[in-house]
Image (cartoon, grey):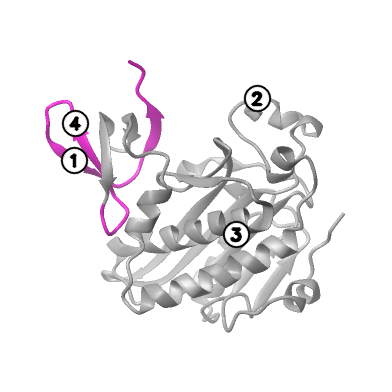
Amino acid sequence: MERLSVASIKKGLTTAFIGRKIIYYRSIGSTNDVAKELAVQGAPEGTLVITDEQTAGKGRLGRRWLAPPHTSLLISLLFRPDLAVHQAQRLTMICSLAVVEAIESVTGLTAAIKWPNDIVVEGKKAGGILTELGATGERLGYAVVGLGLNVNLDFGAVEAMGGLAATATSLSRELGREVSRLTLLWRILENVESRYRHLQAGKLPHDEWASRLVTLHNDLVIDTPQGVVEGWAEGVDADGALILRTNCGERQRVLAGDVTLRKG
């Protein structure tokens, strides 16, 4: 079984700053929590926090992210972007694009994104992204983007995963063989750095992101913090908000929520 270490990660890394400072743990509660602490302490942009086992991993809305040892990519990246708080989803966009591109190039599997932050492989959830912020007024002081990706997770061997087998998957499950987590990590970090440089230069990712979203052009029911909304998913705007055409014909901008297809 492939093991991660600072030395093994650095061995094949070709980036200039993303992942150049590596904080590795064999086991930890949450890589995002560590990355946020490092951000406050002044850690440099591009710092990578990575673990082989996460015992208190977080998904959106405070959900737990299960990840047995040595099965997944569990990472957090620290950014210090020149962005307003309401533009933070642009980081989620570039990172999710970097991940699906890496999956396809390394494995040949078809990968996509479910709005707002799920990684989908062959129609099933294989990972998720959680972006957490530190703000100074209306500007971002820092942002931490966390990724949990099921790489070599054997659903049959993990009792707690039994109920998820119908809707979730891993790369190895779809391929029928193990995937190198290191090779995948190197490609993800390279892609993130390239896309982040483009973002810094003013290139917005939302059009390409929209082309990868399986959510668009469907009738949806979205459970939002403000209540349930229903409508036709028309597109996304520059900051990643979903543009919904409601039953009343109005266009509604939805920033976050749990999405399901509306049954006719």
How far across and how far down the image is residue 168, in percent?
Answer: 61, 34
Instruction: Please report whichever mark, 4 or 2, sits nearer to the chain's N-terminal start.
Output: 2
Furthest-front residue in this view = 108
CB of mark 1 within 8 Å of CB of mark 4? Answer: yes
Q: Residue at position x 54%, y 54% from top?
A: 100
Q: Nearer the viewer, residue 214 or 87?
A: 214
Residue visible at 39% across and 54% down?
A: 209
Q: Which mark is residue 163?
A: 2
Identify residue for label 1: 252
Residue in the foreground of this view, choosing between 214 and 10: 214
Mark 4: secondary structure: strand
Residue picked out by circle 4: 246
Where does the magenta region start and end? 237-264
Disc 3/disc 2 C-alpha distance (Å): 28 Å
Q: CA distance from mark 1 to mark 3?
A: 33 Å
Q: Nearer the viewer, mark 3 or mark 2?
A: 3
Label drawn at residue 102: 3
Location of residue 88 (image quadrant): bottom left
Q: Position of residue 211 (x, y in %)?
A: 38, 50
